[in-house]
Amino acid sequence: MATERTFSIIKPDATARNLTGAINAVIEKSGLRIVAQKRVRWSTAQAEKFYEVHKARPFYGDLVKFMTSGPVVVQVLEGADAVKKYRDVMGATDPGKAAEGTIRKLFAENIERNSVHGSDSQENAALEISLNFKPDEIVG
């Protein structure tokens, strides 16, 4: 397995509950390294661009509103098969269906307020990282 990078967001519901450290502990325990991290407040334009793939979906407006409702923590994670590993660590989108010990099982409030986002492919990880970090912000 090649070392790769993936993108993570700790969403506003989790930052509002001061869960960044607890979520980071689960990430690091899984063997992934956090090689870049910053707390930011997305503008509407940033959230719209990030989620533009969902623009035609009925939940798009609510998603943009939610993701701009408070600070988020954006991260670059690194490790063997990082995209798949982080998706496993996050757990199912619906926390009621997430496996025990996953971030969403431990911390999500519901399917919409599910605490974290992770890239679904290496291609999307590269794009999402480039939208949120300059190359010199990633130490790894």
Image: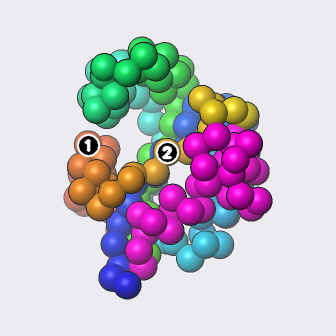
88 with respect to 136 (left or right): right
What residue lies at 30% left-to-right and 47% top-to-bottom?
Answer: 128
What residue lies at 37% left-to-right and 21% top-to-bottom?
Answer: 57
As rendered, which of 26 and 100 lies closer to the eye?
Answer: 100
What residue lies at 51% left-to-right and 58% top-to-bottom?
Answer: 87
Q: Is residue 86 magenta?
A: yes
Q: Is residue 132 visible?
A: yes
Q: Residue 25 in the image: x percent, y percent?
A: 67, 63
Q: Total number of numbered labels?
A: 2
Residue at mark 1: 131
Q: Which residues are magenta?
A: 80-108
- Residue 17, quarter of the rendered image: top right
The reply to whether discs 2 and 1 touch (Cβ–Cβ < 8 Å) is: no
| Residue 29: assigned label | none
- Residue 35, quarter of the rendered image: bottom left
What residue lies at 30% left-to-right and 22% top-to-bottom?
Answer: 55
Q: Quadrant of the C terminus?
A: bottom left
Provide the secondary structure element on which disc 1 rests. Answer: helix
Provide the secondary structure element on which disc 2 rests. Answer: strand
In the displayed structure, 77 sits above or below 118; it is: below
Q: Is residue 68 visible?
A: no
Q: Is residue 121 magenta?
A: no
As rendered, which of 84 and 23 lies closer to the eye?
Answer: 84
Q: Residue 37 in the image: x percent, y percent?
A: 45, 54
Q: Amino acid at mark 2?
A: His
Other-residue count near label 1 (Cα within 10 Å), few / some / many at <14 / 14–19 / ≥20: few
Whole-angstrom CA distance, mark 2 to mark 1, is: 15 Å
Residue at mark 2: 117
Comes first in the chain, label 2 or label 1: 2
Q: Residue 90 in the image: x percent, y percent?
A: 59, 55
Q: Amino acid at mark 1?
A: Leu
